[in-house]
Image: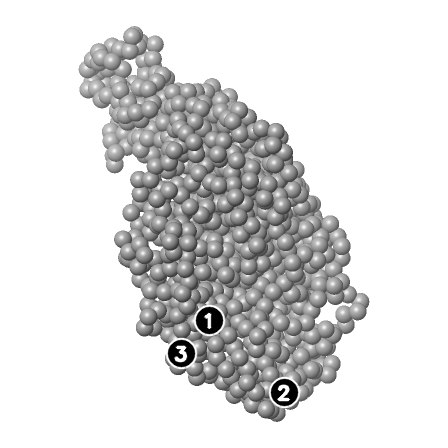
């Protein structure tokens, strides 16, 4: 017996045969609640399968829609909504972003066409009305560009973004000071004209090392009450040098990115006070929200959106009530500790002892985090909901608890440009999941210097990887409004042609780019993938409890990255605030069993503060309660000398250590010193991963809906520059129902196919995956239907597939073949002939050469034709060196008269740049995975002559190198077209007698 293992047919994304959703026997059981008007996938497995072939727009991807402020024509706005809808996308986010205009000195009439003007409002209304007709969700940013800003405040108003500036004078021992209060070392912005003295203090100077001056906290002298008419007289003690510090509150005068967008200019509001959010709401109420706008917004059911928290001050971020709020929230007076929180140009200048300094800064950041939550996010959320909308925000950028904020938002959003590894996404997914919400959005596929040269090969490798980290909605960066004053071909874009003296970042998708011809294929893939990832509830193996919820840091869980994920483990993150959420309870040894179902918690050191073992007393008390309820816990490191988070108050340290000692003594707790000991601790606690496989770059997400398990598996990049190779391997998947059988969900074609080759062992099912770099696949484990009695093939000498109730073996070589069934029975078949591979000898090539027309938005497309006997990039073909556009390759292959119905072939295209479609004998094949250039032609070939056509779409870069050489001329030509090598590789199929 020639029994070869492992050789079950690898699970591929694309199939042209067999399988229908109706035959899966999926139970109609309730899963996670859908997000209703604000998007989200189905709550039941049957809903998923009904929607999978034609997912519609509910789970479709979308675009950031760049507008040149209010200089938009409602008719063009409607046309662009139609373009997006026709392409299969479901979201447009209106964003006023005009960096490219500013870079070229193009000025607009902001009084007439600025953000929030009647012209802008008319454009928004047109978008909302058209979006409702076309089922495209329209989101609107809370203000022009970012951060949130309004033209109704000046930097001197209490509602404007504020900073704490400091002045400093060094005095020798016994020296006298008699002068005006020291002026701030950082001069104010010109628009900031009002300031308020907060305090004046003196400290003994203990020396300066690497630009940090250490002060003696016990020496503090408060001199605030000695200030008279702006002057101060004071003599330093005679026991060493002293530092005299003054603190001034003033407006930062920060404007939103690439301003001005309004007349008068908009200024960033205070994101940490009620006055700041009230200014945003008041402007909407006064200038934007009439009866028609309210009706349209409520009907649209979209989101108010705010970009990342990029509060940029030259001094310390502040808010007028900070001292009072700090005292109330942190429990002590901040005034004695002001030196350690003041900054100049984002750098600290003063310190006390190391412990006090870091603890006070942590408390300060936590208070800022809570103020941002209470006075900005929650206020804007209530306002959005009053309009029938939700709130979608990128709540990161400062040292704030992004994880907690992700839990409270209707939709938290990430970004692929700023996030440094996949754990940055998992951090925010942790908040979403413990809150019981559905969506984690991403501002996606944005790259530096990528304007008009972004390939879908690159974009999909990014998207498929971040999907494996919990993202399940992508807002692509971006779609540009057609035109603006003074722009050049191919039209207006936010960051193109250049940004900061270089080629702009991000792409400007739309009909202006040749790849748009094939974009419905990509849109369908994204909509189906997001449908799967929004269905049911995600489940994980491990949750890491972090002291801090910062994200976009590149700091994750080292063991998971290096050891856990490569062998099948999944993990997420929580911060102390999440442990108070309703889902955070233990049942059957599982944390949040009605949510992410964590089976073990790991508590490690504070990676943001020198690997210190720190924890709040309240957190230790909560974790101890979870441990007593049966949650397995692993303490990483020596926690016997743990310190409280923040500045310790009397009795806190001893209370914390006592609680941790009780936690360590529980039978469900293990203590280890190094990451390498974690697997042993998990095993001792009886925790195993839901998925196991040999070490590889495969990562996955498991979502459970009733008794059905959905597995999204991707050959994923943990970081953007990580190199990947093809992975073909067995993967063991846990099934909720022990009778489950695997099905392949092809997100490119919408087909659902039973898997013929698999093995079951207890609650585990073995399948084989074959994933190219960045590629993904979806496997569903569903309870077997009574009518489905087709035996499983556990090993075979050639790939097998299901066609209805039949199992078909596909042979690439002639001879005897065997398949071993789960019962142990061996089925034999033979193939007498498999045709030799065929290499096309010539191609007719017709290329649409996209060029500027008579205006910035017009494109002409003359066709250039040639015949090729050797495939090469257009950049190497005479007359096509600088062409961008659509290329159509045509060849004829004669398969002879002995071609039979049992013969088939795959078309190996080799290298293709960028998107492509294949037509055989006049019939266009289903969409092809951009990352996989091997296409199964199935039964579309016939005896004799066969016409094969390959349509390839490029970026615009090569043509723009000649149109705008001063910008794009620095870039190398991209190698467009069908590069090959191309082969038609036949196979023969035989139905196995089971």
Label drawn at residue 297: none
Residue drawn at x 76%, y 57% as measured from the top left? 27
Q: Which is more N-terminal, label 2 or label 3?
A: 3
Label drawn at residue 867: 3
Residue contact at pointers 2 and 1, CB within 8 angstroms: no
Residue drawn at x 69%, y 69% as measured from the top left? 19
Q: Farthest front residue? A: 854
Instruction: State the SS at label 2.
Output: loop
- Which residue is tagged 2? 900
Task: Decide: is 96 above or below 937.
Answer: above
Q: Few, some or many C-alpha atoms within 10 Å of disc 1 (few <14, some 14-19, many ≥20)?
A: many
- Which residue is tagged 1? 888
For the residues labelled 2 and 1, the Cα–Cα distance comes to: 29 Å
For the residues labelled 3 and 1, the Cα–Cα distance comes to: 11 Å
Picture coordinates of residue 63 (x, y %)? 51, 48
Residue contact at pointers 3 and 1, CB within 8 angstroms: no
For the residues labelled 3 and 2, the Cα–Cα distance comes to: 31 Å
Q: Nearer the viewer, residue 67 or 273?
A: 67
Task: Decide: is 453 above or below 283.
Answer: below
Q: Nearer the viewer, residue 690 or 615?
A: 690
Q: Few, some or many C-alpha atoms within 10 Å of disc 2 (few <14, some 14-19, many ≥20)?
A: few
Q: Which is more N-terminal, label 1 or label 3?
A: 3
Task: Tell us which disc is closer to us: 2 or 1.
Answer: 1
Residue drawn at x 30%, y 10% as measured from the top left? 227
Q: Farthest right residue? A: 786
Task: Decide: is 754 above or below 586.
Answer: below
For the N terminus, the image quarter is bottom right
Q: Farthest top residue? A: 228
């Amino acid at each position: 017996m020639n029994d070869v293992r492992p050789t079950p047919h690898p699970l591929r994304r694309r199939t042209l045969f067999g399988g229908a959703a109706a035959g899966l026997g999926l139970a109609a059981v309730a899963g996670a609640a859908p997000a209703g008007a604000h998007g989200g996938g189905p709550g039941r497995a049957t809903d998923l399968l009904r929607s999978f072939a034609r997912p519609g727009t509910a789970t479709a991807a979308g675009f950031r829609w760049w507008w040149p402020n209010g200089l938009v024509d409602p008719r063009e706005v409607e046309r662009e909504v139609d373009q997006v809808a026709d392409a299969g996308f479901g979201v447009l986010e209106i964003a006023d972003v005009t960096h490219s205009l500013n870079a070229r000195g193009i000025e607009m009439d902001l009084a007439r066409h600025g953000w929030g003007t009647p012209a802008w409002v008319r454009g928004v209304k047109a978008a909302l009305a058209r979006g409702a007709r076309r089922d495209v969700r329209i989101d609107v940013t809370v203000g022009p560009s970012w951060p949130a800003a309004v033209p109704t405040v000046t930097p001197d108003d209490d509602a404007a973004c504020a900073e704490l500036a400091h002045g400093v004078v060094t005095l020798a021992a016994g020296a006298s000071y008699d002068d005006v209060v020291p002026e701030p070392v950082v001069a104010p912005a010109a628009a900031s004209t009002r300031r308020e003295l907060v305090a004046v203090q003196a400290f003994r100077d203990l020396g300066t090392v690497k630009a940090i001056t250490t002060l003696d906290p016990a020496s503090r002298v408060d001199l605030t009450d000695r200030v008279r008419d702006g002057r101060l007289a004071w003599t330093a003690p005679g026991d060493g040098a002293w530092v005299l510090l003054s603190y001034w509150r003033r407006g930062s005068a920060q404007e939103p990115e690439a301003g001005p967008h309004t007349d008068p200019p908009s200024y960033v509001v205070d994101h940490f006070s009620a006055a700041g959010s009230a200014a945003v709401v008041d402007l909407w109420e006064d200038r934007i929200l009439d009866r028609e706008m309210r009706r349209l917004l409520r009907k649209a059911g979209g989101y108010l959106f705010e970009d990342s928290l990029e509060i940029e001050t030259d001094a310390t971020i502040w808010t007028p009530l900070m001292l009072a709020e700090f005292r109330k929230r942190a429990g002590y007076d901040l005034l004695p500790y002001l030196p350690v929180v003041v900054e100049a140009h984002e750098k600290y200048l003063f310190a006390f002892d190391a412990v006090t300094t870091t603890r006070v800064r942590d408390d300060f950041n936590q208070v800022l985090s809570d103020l941002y939550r209470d006075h900005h996010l929650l206020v804007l959320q209530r306002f959005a909901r009053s309009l029938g909308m939700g709130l979608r925000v990128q709540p990161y950028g400062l040292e704030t608890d992004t994880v907690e904020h992700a839990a409270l938002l209707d939709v938290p959003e990430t970004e692929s440009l700023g996030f440094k590894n996949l754990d940055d996404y998992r951090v925010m997914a942790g908040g979403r999941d413990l809150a019981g919400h559905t969506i984690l959005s991403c501002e996606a596929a944005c790259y530096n210097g990528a304007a008009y040269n972004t390939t879908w090969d690159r974009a999909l490798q990014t998207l498929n990887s971040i999907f494996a980290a919990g993202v399940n909605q992508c807002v692509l960066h971006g779609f540009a409004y057609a035109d603006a004053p003074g722009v050049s071909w191919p039209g207006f874009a936010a960051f193109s042609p250049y940004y900061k003296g270089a080629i702009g970042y991000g792409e400007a998708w739309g009909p202006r780019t040749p790849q748009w011809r094939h974009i419905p294929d990509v849109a369908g893939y994204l909509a189906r993938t997001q449908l799967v990832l929004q269905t049911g509830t995600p489940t994980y193996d491990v949750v890491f409890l972090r002291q801090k919820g910062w994200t976009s840091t590149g700091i994750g869980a080292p063991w998971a990255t290096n050891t856990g994920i490569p062998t099948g483990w999944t993990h997420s993150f929580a911060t102390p605030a999440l442990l108070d959420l309703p889902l955070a309870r233990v049942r059957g040894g599982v944390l949040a069993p009605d949510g992410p179902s964590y089976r073990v918690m790991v508590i490690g050191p504070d990676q943001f503060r020198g690997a210190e073992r720190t924890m709040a007393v309240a957190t230790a008390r909560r974790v101890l309660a979870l441990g007593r309820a049966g949650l397995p816990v692993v303490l990483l490191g020596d926690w016997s000398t743990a310190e409280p988070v923040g500045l310790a108050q009397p009795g806190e340290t001893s209370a914390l250590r006592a609680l941790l000692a009780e936690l360590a003594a529980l039978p469900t707790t293990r203590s280890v010193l190094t990451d390498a000991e974690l697997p042993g601790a998990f095993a001792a606690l009886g925790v195993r991963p839901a998925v196991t496989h040999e070490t590889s770059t495969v990562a996955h997400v498991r979502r459970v809906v009733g008794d059905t398990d959905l597995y999204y598996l991707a050959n994923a990049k943990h970081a953007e520059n990580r190199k990947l190779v093809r992975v073909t391997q067995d993967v063991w998947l846990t099934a909720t129902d022990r009778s489950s059988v695997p099905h392949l969900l092809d997100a490119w074609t919408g087909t659902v196919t039973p898997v013929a080759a698999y093995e079951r062992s207890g609650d585990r099912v073995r399948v084989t995956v074959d994933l190219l770099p960045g590629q993904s696949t979806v496997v569903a484990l569903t309870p077997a239907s009574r009518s489905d009695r087709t035996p499983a093939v556990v090993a075979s000498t050639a790939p097998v597939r299901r066609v209805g109730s039949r199992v078909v073996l596909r042979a690439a070589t002639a001879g005897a073949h065997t398949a071993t069934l789960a019962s142990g029975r061996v089925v034999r078949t033979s193939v007498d002939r498999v045709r030799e591979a065929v290499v096309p000898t010539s191609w007719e090539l017709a290329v649409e050469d996209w060029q500027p027309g008579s205006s910035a938005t017009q494109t002409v497309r003359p066709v250039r034709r040639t015949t090729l006997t050797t495939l090469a990039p257009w950049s190497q073909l005479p007359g096509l060196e600088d062409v961008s556009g659509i290329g159509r390759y045509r060849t004829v292959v004669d398969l002879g008269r002995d071609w039979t119905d049992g013969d088939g072939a795959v078309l190996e295209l080799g290298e293709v740049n960028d998107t492509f479609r294949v037509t055989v004998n006049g019939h266009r094949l289903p969409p092809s995975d951009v990352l996989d250039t091997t296409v199964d032609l199935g039964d579309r070939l016939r005896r004799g002559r066969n016409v094969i056509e390959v349509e390839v779409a490029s970026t615009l870069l090569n043509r723009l190198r000649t149109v705008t050489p001063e910008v794009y001329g620095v870039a190398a030509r991209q190698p467009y077209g069908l590069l090959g090598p191309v082969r038609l590789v036949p196979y023969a199929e035989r139905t196995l007698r089971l």
